[in-house]
Each structure stands twice: as structure tokens, then as C-alpha cells.
Amino acid sequence: MTQLTGHSASLDFSQPEPVDMSSGKYVKLWQGPQHPGITGNMSLELTLDGDEIIECKTHVGYLHRAFEKLMEGRNYIQNFTVVCRIAVPEPAFNEYLYAEGLEQLSGIEAPERAQWIRTLNLEMMRLASFMMWIGGQSGAFGLYTVPNWTIAYRDYVLDLFEEMTGGRIYHMYMVPGGVRFDLPKDFDKRVKEVMDGAEKLLDQVERVMYNNVVFKARSKGLGIITPEMVDPYGIVGPNARASGIKRDLRKDEPYLVYDQLDFDIISGTGADAYERAYLRLQETRQCISLIRQCMDRMPRSGPLQAEMPNVLHWKIPPGETYVKAECTRGEYGYFMVTDGTEYIRRVFVRGPSYTHAIAVMEKLAVGTNIADIAGLMVSLHTYPPEIER
């Protein structure tokens, strides 16, 4: 038996005894691979005793795979078309971390205005991702009015990305040394309009979804993550903060211009699916505030790119680095190794989905009613392609 201690409690990580299926008492059922709120193929192999889950095994795969190995065969600039696919609803975090890692390894620093624009880009990405997630969480409990609202409104945010970068989903905008080009004319006015509308929509969502007696009844008490589980299971982001753990890389280890923005770490105490959902609603409102601050405070002029070598024949000196950022789901990190050639030697992507979708999901599912398993799964906010990277 292997035990790992986190905080004051001791957690058992030994493998459970396999379920004896020969008795005919239990039933095997596959749920998935398509789910509202889960972007990618993710199947749950469930063993049921009546309508109660007694064993859960997560299966992902065969959608987007092997990104890390693919990147070893492409030069540095070509990999920007690869990294975006690792987390489809929020590719900007992969863009930023890949660019930041190369900048650290080569001794390049992006100009100040480029850093403000990068921060704006990441917070817009957070807003779009949360809009999709809120709809998925509501839909997982059968309330489909909310996803019709939020996923539709997400398109207005994607319109802003199209203006800013030329692409709605995959942007390839944050390149090594800065950003590709400046914000379009009168962009601040259109951002303000979209943010005003988003705030009004979130008020409606709170009334219809979060104050809904059925949503409360089904999500409260579901999938409780105690503070003692956070460190042993590698739980990060809203899943950890809903348990009262105040951790956010934007505050704890500021990057870009987050140290110049006004915001606090939001945390909760309920630790269940409802608390995670409500915390994400609050963080959605918070990122609207951060977008407004970026637009108001960024320099109105200045360079967007540092002086760069020919990126088609770019050789970075041997070295290694680990860069990280706070994505919508928590710590997202890139470990990168270079060997002096035109190709990266090794990339390892640390995404929150691996621990949340497998270790945490398989534990929390036990004892859950089959009707609530989709709601539990979406409450952990995972992206399967990030697991098979």
C-alpha cells in the first residue's frame, strides 16, 4: 500500500480490488465519448450496482495526440500550428507558454505593449472558455436554456479574436518576441460593448441556473473535494480554490502585467460541484474586469516585437526551462529543453486535465448516482486532448 500525506490527512493511493463480475450482481456501462461541456473524446467505463457507481475508469483518446513528439520534428516557428490544438477551447495559453519558454531560453524579452496585449488576449480566452463551460455544466444537468445563451454569446468574444488575430479559434498570434500585429482601430469600443453584454448575460444566468432549485439539489454535495485532497492529487485552479485553497499563479507568481492589475484570489468553502460552478461564475465576472483594465491601462503606442533572428533558421543555445500560467482550469506549464539545433529537444506539457479527469474523476465517481455522473465530470472542467498530448 502506498500512502501520500497531504495537509493533516492520509490518503490511500493503493489500487482497489477488481470488481467480481461473475456473480451477475453488477453491470458494466459505457458513458461517452461525447458529453456537453467536455471538448473531445472521453469515455467512462462504469460498473454499477443498481444505479450507484462502484467503479469508474476514464478512457480518452484518438482525437488529438502526440503533440510533444510531433514538436521535435518541426522547427520552432512551425510548432505554433501544433501547440494550439492541445487545448482547443483555450489555445492562447499554449501559444503564450511556448513563446515565453523560447524567449527565456534565447534571452529575448517582449516589449511592454506586447505584454499588455498578451494579457488581454489571455483574459479574453478565459472569458470564452468559461462561457462554454457554464453552458456545458448547465446542460449536463438537463437545463439547456443556459448553453443556448452562453455558447451563443461566446461567438461575440470569438468575433473579437477574429478582429485581433485574424482567427476565431486558432490564432497563432503570440509569437516569440511579442505579438504579430497591433489591435485594430476602435477595438476598445467593441470590447466594451461585448463586456457590457456579457455582464448582463451573467446576471440572467445566475438567476436561471444558479438560483434554480433543481440545479442546487443535484449539484450541492456532489463530488466533494476536501482541502486534504488538493496536494496529493495535484488539484489546481477553481477545483482547488472551491475547497478554500487560495492559489492563483497570477497573484502568487505574477507574469506578464498581472502585477499591475487589481483583483483578488476568489475562493470558496463548499468544495462540491455547486461551489465549483459558482466560483467559476465569479471568476468569469472577474476576467471581464481584467479585460476592461487591460484596455484602459495599456500603453497606446510602442513596439510590438523584440528584435528577432531569422525564425526559419533559429538556433537556440542548449538549456532548459519551465514556464507556467494560470489557465481557466489552473496551473498550465511547459518544460522545454533545447540542444543548440534548429529543433526543440524535448517538450513536456503539464495540463490540469490529466489529474482532474483520471485520478480525481475515478475517485469522486464512486458512490455517485448514474444520473449525476455527467454533471460531476463537467464540474472538474477537463479537455481530453490535453491528456494524450
Image: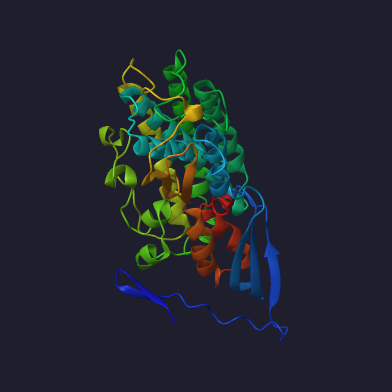
Task: Judge by depth and name the residue closer to the eye, 245 or 342.
Answer: 342
Reply above or below: 304 against 118: above
Task: Judge by depth and name the residue closer to the eye, 309 or 41.
Answer: 309
In the rendered structure, the answer to whether residue 278 lies left or right of residue 172 reads left
Q: Position of residue 386 (x, y in %)?
A: 54, 50
Q: Position of residue 111 (x, y in %)?
A: 33, 24
Q: Is residue 51 visible?
A: no
Q: Position of residue 298 (x, y in %)?
A: 32, 22
Residue at 33%, 28% in the rendered image: 293
In the rendered structure, the answer to whether residue 325 lies left or right of residue 209 reads left
- As drawn, the residue found furthest toward the top would be 185
Q: Quadrant of the N terminus?
A: bottom left
Reply above or below: 384 against 342: below
Residue at 55%, 29% in the rendered image: 158
Colouring method of the image = rainbow
- As drawn, the residue found furthest toward the bottom would be 23
Q: Position of residue 199 (x, y in %)?
A: 44, 33
Q: Is residue 125 visible?
A: yes
Residue 105, picture quadrant:
top left
Reply above or below: 52 against 167: below
In the rendered structure, the answer to whether residue 302 lies left or right of residue 366 reads left
Task: Judge by depth and name the residue closer to the eye, 157 or 71.
Answer: 71
Count of numbered badges drawn on the protein: 0
Reply above or below: 147 against 66: above
Task: Judge by depth and name the residue closer to the eye, 301 or 65.
Answer: 65
Residue at 35%, 54% in the rendered image: 268
In the rendered structure, the answer to whether residue 375 lies left or right of residue 331 reads right
